[in-house]
Each structure stands twice: as C-alpha cells, then as structure tokens.
DNA sequence: CGTATGCTCAAACGATCGTTTGATTCCTGG
DNA sequence: CCAGGAATCAAACGATCGTTTGAGCATACG
C-alpha cells in the first residue's frame, strides 16, 4: 500500500528499545526518531501522540502474548488431570518465548517498567487489555488450589507475579551459559520458574 | 542551629511522596517545592542538585533500614539453631516496620521504583549502600541451604527479592481489614511473606 | 498531463524543566 | 547594637520537551 508501514515499524522497534532503556518519559521523541532514522514529526503523524505510540508498543506484543497464553491455557483448563505446573507452563512459556525472540526480547523489560510506573492512564490501558487473561488464569488456579481462601490465593498470585515480572524483565540472572543451547536454556529457565512459582502457590 | 533543618526535612518528606507518586523524573522541583511550602531555589541551595536530593531521600531511610536488618541478622547468623524463617524475619520485619511507619510508608514504593528504573548512577549508588547487606544475608542463606548450588541460590534469592519488592511497594494487597489491629496485621503480613519466601527458597 | 493524496521534512511553537543569579531578609555572635 | 554569614525569595537563564505548521516530494488515478 504505502511505505509508511516500514516507517511505523521502525518507530515501534526503536521505541521498544528506548522505552526499555530509559523509560517512557526518559526516552524523547527526538532520540527515538533519530534512532529509527525517521523525521521527528513522523510519530505524531502516524500515531497521533507519544501516548498513543506507547499504547501501540504494548498492543503489538501483548496481543500475541495474550493469544499464546490463552491458547495454552485452554488446552489444560478444567481438565481433571491438569496440574499446577501445567497452568504455570501456559503462563510462563509464551513470555519466555517472547523474551528469547530477538525482536521482542526487550518487551518484558518494558512491561516491568509499566508495572513500576503508577501512571493511571497506562495502568487502565493494561488492565483493559490484560485483565481478562489474569482472570482466566486466576480461575484455574482457584480450581487447582481449592483449600486456599480467595484472599490467600490473590496474595500468592500477586507474589508470584512480582517474582516472575522481576525475573523476566532482565533484572534476574537469566543468562545462558556457553555450551548450553538456546532451546535447552529456555527449557531450563521455564522449569526453574515453574518450580519456584508452584512452591510459592501451593505451600501448606 | 538554623531553620534550614526544618526546610531540608520538609523537602525530603515532600520528595518522598512525589517520587513515589510520579517517579524521579516525573516529579518536578516546582511541584516538589510547592508541596513542601519552600522556595524553588531551596533544593539547589540545600542539596546541590536534584540528583543529590534523590540520593538523600534514599540515604535517610536506607541507613536505618540497613541498620535494623543487620542488627536482626547478627542475632541469628551463624548459630546452629537458626532457621530459614529466622533469617527471612530479619530481612522482612524491618522493611514492614518502615512501611507501617506513617512517615516512611511511601519509601518502599520509592525503592521499588528505583529497582525498575535502569538509571546507572542510581543503581551504583544503591549497590554501594545496599550491596553489603544483601551479601551478608546471602551468606547466611547459603549456610542454611547447603544443598543448593551457588547459581541455584542466587536464582531463588533473586526471585524472592522480586516478590517481596513487588509486594512491599504497595502493588500488593497488603491492606489491613477493619477489626484487625495494626500490629496484628503486620505480624500476619510478615508471617505470610516469610512462608512464601521460605517455600520458594527451600523447595526440593 | 494535471491533480489529488499520502508521506516526509526543516523549522518553529509554547510549555516546562533544572539551575543560577542577585537582592533581600533573618538570625546570631561579638 | 550592629556587622556578617546563612537562608529565602522572585526572576530569569538556557536547554529540552511534545506538538504543530506549511512547504516540498512522491506516487497513483482521472
């Protein structure tokens, strides 16, 4: 159609990198457009405003992440032989796959930054696009942990979320050792996070 | 001595609130000095720069927090009958006491924000003032969890740190129910966090 | 060919930022 | 009482921010 698709993608990619590095306020549109090799006015032309650009950065990744998570959850939800580890796998694996993806490896860090910033507008946007996913997972956790009160369950999910967000956003020590393949390392990391989360969720 | 002590304290208190609410970059010195009821130039006069003010906000709270944590740790470290829960108590209780303190309740949120922001200068400052505390706790964890490899231990401590930071910074659902005293609620919360952290650290 | 449309560009806009200045007020020690 | 450093104040500085403007360029269609 038009060459603007390339320009929009270049902006989104550069924005993801700079937002992860310097935060949403810290990354200026001048740095951003310079890194993307486009004109300063291109952001407002293609996205309307900087805030809309931030939303688009999230939407591009969250749409696929949510789809993968829900698809994986639907395969195990409600089934009698499903274990806690199965549900955690459905939650963690798509995020790790995104982290391992070269073009999306920075997004989890952007997501963690969004959690840390208390911007009401951004939180509302995330809640609208992310809330139903967490609700479905919470419902399945509740089914598998019937001995926990509602309050207790929310507590533990909240703590697990904090741990996973912290770890997957790049603060953690998810660093592949030499001699370990990318796939093997990812499986190792997933197993690690699942065991930790399962222990935190289901301890007596 | 001089009335500047009051001015400095007013600035520090207002800064803690605004930094927690809007972040370090998001809170401007004009908002800050207006909230504190002091002149705009007072920040640069008393602290030298905004960055130095940020450091002072941390220093004021971290000094006492670290002291309390190390004092509690020294009572149990190295002793044969010490449990994992004892060490976690030494780590968590001082932070919760700070959160419950009226004047310092916002600091944990400021601390979480500092973790999220990847500002190198701030991270170096925190590492200098905080690193030795984490090293001492890590050493004690290593003593109590001898079956874990060094890498495995770091992994779990990192995840626990993420969970506790997330929870204690106010994202979590640490909300006192009506009819529960402040002290009772704090003990309840501490017990909660300790059980979660112990499960995550020591699971097989 | 002419023109309409989508896009890019340099330049400027007003606002806000952290910081500095210089005068003024406050307060204390001699 | 009064000299002098400490503290406060209004005002301005230069820099940078997100956004807007209007001209220029390209491509596609009648």
Image (cartoon, coloured by chain):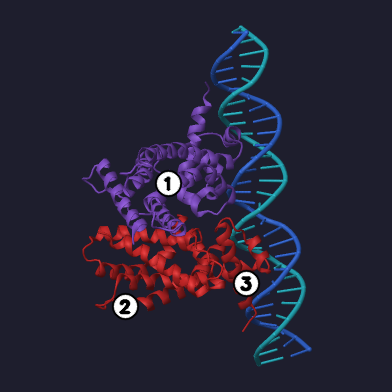
Chain colours: A red, B purple, C blue, D cyan
Q: Which residue is mark 3?
A: A10
| x then y, percent, for residue A119 | 46, 56
Secondary element at tag 3: helix
| x then y, percent, for residue B79 | 35, 41
Taking depth in this image into account, of B93 and B70 the one nearest to the observer is B70
- Horizontal side of residue A89 vs B7, given as left or right: left
| x then y, percent, for residue B132 | 49, 43
| Chain under callout 3 | A
Mark 2 → mark 3, Cα distance in angstroms: 38 Å
Secondary element at tag 2: loop
Which quarter of the image is occupied by the C terminus of chain B?
A: bottom left
| Chain under callout 1 | B
Q: Are marks 2 and 1 on the same chain?
A: no
Q: Which residue is mark 1?
A: B137
Q: Are marks 3 and 1 on the same chain?
A: no
Taking depth in this image into account, of B32 and A69 the one nearest to the observer is A69
Would you place residue A53 above or below residue B178 in this image?
below
Give yes or no for contact between labels 2 and 3 (Cβ–Cβ under 8 Å).
no
| x then y, percent, for residue A139 | 28, 69
Q: Which residue is mark 2?
A: A76
Mark 3 → mark 1, Cα distance in angstroms: 45 Å
Between circles 2 and 1, the one closer to the viewer is 1
Would you place residue B110 above or below residue C30 in this image?
below
Would you place residue B164 above or below residue B39 in this image?
below
Taking depth in this image into account, of A70 and A9 the one nearest to the observer is A70
Mark 2 → mark 1, Cα distance in angstroms: 40 Å
Q: In which quarter of the view is residue A37 placed?
A: bottom right
Q: State the residue at coordinates (44%, 39%).
A: B66
Q: In which quarter of the view is residue A144 placed?
A: bottom left
């Amino acid at each position: 159609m038009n060459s603007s698709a390339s320009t929009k993608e270049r902006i989104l990619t550069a924005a993801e990198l700079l937002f992860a590095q310097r935060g949403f306020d810290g990354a200026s549109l001048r740095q951003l457009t310079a890194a993307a090799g486009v004109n300063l006015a291109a952001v407002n032309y293609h996205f309307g405003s900087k805030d809309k650009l931030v939303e688009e950065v999230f939407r591009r990744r969250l749409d696929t992440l949510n789809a993968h998570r829900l698809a994986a959850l639907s395969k195990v939800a409600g089934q009698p032989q499903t274990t806690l580890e199965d549900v955690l796998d459905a939650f963690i694996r798509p995020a790790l796959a995104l982290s391992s993806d070269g073009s999306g490896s920075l997004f989890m860090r952007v997501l963690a930054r969004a959690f840390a910033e208390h911007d009401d507008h951004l939180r509302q946007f995330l809640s609208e696009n992310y809330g139903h996913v967490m609700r479905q997972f919470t419902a399945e956790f509740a089914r598998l942990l019937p001995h926990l009160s509602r309050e207790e369950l929310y507590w533990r999910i909240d703590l697990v979320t904090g741990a996973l967000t912290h770890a997957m956003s790049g603060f953690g020590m998810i660093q592949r050792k030499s001699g370990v393949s990318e796939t093997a390392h990812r499986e190792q990391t997933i197993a690690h996070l699942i065991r930790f989360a399962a222990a935190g969720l289901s301890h007596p």
